Image: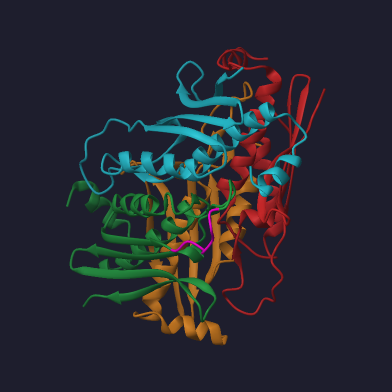
Chain colours: A orange, B green, C cyan, D red
Amino acid sequence: MSSRDEKAAKRFGCSERERALFEAGIKMGTIYHQFVGTPVSAYNAAELEKAIEMSVMVQPFVESVKIKINLPAKEKKDTYDYVSLTGDMMDAVVVIRIEDVSVTAEMRYDTELDYPLMYVSEVSL
Amino acid sequence: MSSRDEKAAKRFGCSERERALFEAGIKMGTIYHQFVGTPVSAYNAAELEKAIEMSVMVQPFVESVKIKINLPAKEKKDTYDYVSLTGDMMDAVVVIRIEDVSVTAEMRYDTELDYPLMYVSEVSL
Amino acid sequence: MSSRDEKAAKRFGCSERERALFEAGIKMGTIYHQFVGTPVSAYNAAELEKAIEMSVMVQPFVESVKIKINLPAKEKKDTYDYVSLTGDMMDAVVVIRIEDVSVTAEMRYDTELDYPLMYVSEVSL
Amino acid sequence: MSSRDEKAAKRFGCSERERALFEAGIKMGTIYHQFVGTPVSAYNAAELEKAIEMSVMVQPFVESVKIKINLPAKEKKDTYDYVSLTGDMMDAVVVIRIEDVSVTAEMRYDTELDYPLMYVSEVSL
């Protein structure tokens, strides 16, 4: 741990485990609110998935991140056949690790809820 | 609690307290990544603060949110004297409540760290 | 005109009229890509309209801007009944003025095209 | 031209040449306001450039787009050594083509203006 990491850690009024849950939430908010609105079609969906993954990887405490963009079914007919990325189209799995604690958070469109739910699927220990 | 709230709660592999920390993180990520880049000057700073606060209030489990935008000191000289909102310019305090648990999360530019740190300042109980 | 305005004007390899059309396009892209994804419900829709208008007003050469957010019809039933702003929900009218030229640009969901079309409705002269 | 392209063209109260300038502006606003705020470091800068380029390519009338991200000089020291993408860090060149008209628009940080200027560098004909 660097000196700056130690100073940052002192700002927190909670346990390391609790911080890992907070950091997982930050990454979910980042994925959604940074990238929703991006123009996407079959041409660039795989590239955009990779770019989102790599941009989340540079944030603190991210062990892994996996993004899947589910495009609406439509035929390419003309100039206007692309869409803006929405939360409903994205599946995300992010694993956060702080020291010995790991948190897995997920986002996916929940058909039963009719809502792109972000949730914690697993906490270690 | 509605039926949909109950169904959503079952998706979580963690305690209510841990969920509150996760939700706090989501809101911090939302504030930062939705609004960074917005054109701002003395003309619209107060309005933008209020709009950010109200948009976070419509998200689940938010009890209160307070935003302060700190504009760089500069004189209005011409057409180009406005800025794009950056994380360094924002102070945020968000209180999340789920049942009996409340979490206070903050974001502010930390001069010692030279970084706009998001942190948990308080967890109830 | 300030000295900085004059210097900026020299960077352009086109007429003032053509620049006004370019500036109108920039503002449309700003409205869409800055604000799509923002959490919105009946609680904050009017506030968000005003905040978008005022943030576009601080950009160069904007004479007026009018935003209308059309919320999907749904009853407030529970925690999850808000939406993320999409381009399909927004009507925008922006008037750009550079010297004697004025350009009116609009964005609205075009039902015939099934697309949130941005277009130039009027150019002066 | 598809039937939808023809219908969209009829919405415009300006020439094809003028529309090309408007479309160029839209793309500049998209690049700036969609991606400013994205976490970036040496690890993902090239990937992010490519993802921005490809997402602009799926928008209407884009012939080519080139993005260059100029990272601030800093050593990787700890967890917090990444930045959020700002307009000042981006160079963009976009070529729009509608029928026989091509427009080249650019964005780069202009040191003389101290501003990330978007401008039209060339219009054909």
Q: Is residue B75 magenta?
A: yes
- Please tell me whether residue B31 is drawn above or below residue D120 in the rendered image: below
- Please tell me whether residue C109 is drawn above or below residue B25 in the rendered image: above
Q: Is residue D48 visible?
A: yes
Q: Residue at x 28, y 30 (%)?
A: C73
From the top left corner, tell me how far across and down residue C27 is, in percent.
55, 37
From the top left corner, tell me how far across and down residue D53 is, in percent.
69, 44
Along the line of sight, the residue nearer the viewer: C20 or D22: C20
Mostly what secondary structure, the magenta segment?
loop
- Please tell me whether residue C24 is drawn above or below residue B62 in the rendered image: above
Residue range (magenta): B70-76
Q: Is residue D47 magenta?
A: no
Q: Is residue A92 visible?
A: no
- Please tell me whether residue A52 is drawn above or below residue A70 in the rendered image: below
Q: Residue at x 52, y 42 (%)?
A: C33
The image quarter in which residue A19 lies = bottom left
The image quarter in which residue D44 lies = bottom right
Number of numbered tags placed on the structure image: 0
Q: Considering the image in quadrants, where does the C terminus of chain B appear?
A: bottom left
